[in-house]
């Protein structure tokens, strides 16, 4: 960030750059998440492949209004936004060269840019020259300054710390954490979501982008963020990343050590038997996944025992009847309460955590 007055937690007029991301949601999950949790602030979505169509019909999100889908950045700028959020991850995680002129136009028009991609937009000479008070580049995929290695210090915090872990990447850990946070706030609990990825950061306005942090400092980065958010809170809901089951994931263990969780919630996708990117790797039975996470969290007694208090099931692709059947099956298998927090609320799992 280059503007010290910048605060993404303030109400914005957002446009979301989402080219092809509405029709291929796995590449556009950041934008979809922004629509779900900051939809009231979105004035347009930019997607040349879906322009003119109904956003409600494409996303199936419970939007209060059918936000327009436009084809170009110029059309979106006519709606007087305060910020443009890049809502998708192109191949390689970098800004495509043919987007740069539009992003330069955005800044010249007095509109800030939020980016979770690897490209450092603030280092582009034309963009840097156009920045001024009230216009900034939030390049969130940067390692925070002054990091140190983790110490396990979060274990001494008085607040509860709930970490969402999963059977794979990109299955809804952030969404589950946000739903639990929202439900806890509605009950009057002093509750705070801690973002650890670009989507969570855009939604909450703060956090640390864990995949931008060198592995030696990853648990320390999580610990620092947890310690920063803890004062005055009863519960922290820490966004999970990756999975202990996924060979490409390095994020889950630093999250466990940095959070020093008091509770774990296992997130799984209903009906999925193998890892999405590694179909030759089967997902173990949920009961074994629960045991694995509890064993790793406690580390043979080096840390306090940490219970898995429930299963958050992602049933997005199921009918209501199929979703309820999957939830009942997971509860029978594990002996733990199970829910789809988006569809049915956190329910008994939240009750257990609040006891």
Image (cartoon, rainbow, N blue to C red):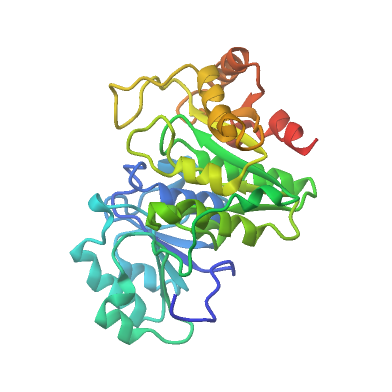
Q: Position of residue 224 (x, y in %)?
A: 57, 59
Residue at 31% from the left image edge and 71% from the top image edge:
121
- Residue 262 in percent (x, y) is at 67, 39
Residue at x-position 59% and y-position 47%:
259
| Residue drawn 48% across the image and 23% down it | 270
Return the x and y of residue 219 as percentages of the image width and height.
50, 51
Judge from the rendering whether residue 62 lies leftward or rightward of residue 181; answer left or right: left
Classify residue 70 by image quadrant: bottom left
Taking depth in this image into account, of 99 and 262 the one nearest to the observer is 262
**Residue 272 screen position, x and y as percent:** 41, 22
Q: Is residue 108 above or below residue 67?
A: below
Q: Is residue 306 left or right of residue 203?
A: right
Q: Nearer the viewer, residue 275 or 154?
A: 154
Tell me if residue 239 can be seen: no
In depth, the one of 296 and 161 nearer the eye is: 296
Lateral position of residue 307 relative to residue 197, left or right: right
In which quarter of the view is residue 310 placed? top right
Classify residue 175 by image quadrant: top right
Q: Is residue 34 above or below residue 288?
A: below
């Amino acid at each position: 960030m280059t503007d010290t007055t910048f605060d993404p937690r303030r109400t914005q007029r957002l446009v979301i750059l989402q080219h092809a991301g509405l029709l291929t949601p796995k590449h556009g999950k950041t934008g979809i998440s922004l629509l779900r949790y900051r939809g009231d602030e979105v004035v347009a979505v930019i997607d040349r492949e879906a322009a003119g169509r109904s956003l409600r019909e494409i996303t199936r999100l419970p939007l209060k209004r059918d936000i327009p889908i436009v084809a170009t950045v110029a059309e979106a700028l006519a709606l007087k936004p305060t910020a443009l959020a890049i809502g998708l991850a192109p191949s390689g995680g970098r800004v495509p060269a043919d987007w740069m002129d539009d992003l330069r136009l955005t800044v010249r028009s007095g509109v800030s840019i939020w980016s979770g991609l690897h490209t450092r937009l603030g280092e582009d000479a034309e963009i840097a020259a156009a920045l001024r008070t009230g216009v900034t580049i939030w390049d969130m995929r940067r390692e925070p300054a002054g990091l140190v290695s983790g110490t396990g210090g979060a274990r001494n915090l008085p607040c509860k710390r709930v970490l969402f872990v999963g059977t794979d990447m990109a299955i809804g850990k952030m969404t589950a954490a946000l739903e639990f946070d929202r439900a806890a706030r509605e009950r009057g609990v002093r509750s705070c979501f801690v973002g650890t990825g670009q989507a969570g950061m855009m939604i909450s306005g703060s956090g640390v982008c864990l995949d931008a942090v060198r592995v030696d400092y990853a648990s320390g980065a999580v610990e620092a963020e947890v310690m920063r958010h803890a004062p005055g809170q009863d519960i922290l809901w820490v966004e999970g990343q990756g999975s202990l089951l996924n060979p490409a994931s390095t994020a889950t263990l630093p999250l466990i050590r940095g959070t020093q969780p008091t509770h774990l919630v296992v997130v799984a996708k209903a009906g999925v038997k193998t890892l999405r990117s590694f179909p030759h790797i089967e997902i173990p039975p949920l009961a074994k996944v629960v045991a694995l996470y509890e064993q790793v969290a406690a580390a043979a007694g080096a840390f306090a025992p940490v219970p898995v208090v429930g299963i958050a099931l992602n049933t997005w692709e199921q009918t209501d009847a199929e979703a309820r059947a999957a939830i009942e099956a997971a509860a029978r298998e594990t002996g733990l309460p199970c829910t789809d927090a988006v569809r049915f609320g956190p329910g008994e799992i939240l009750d257990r955590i609040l006891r």
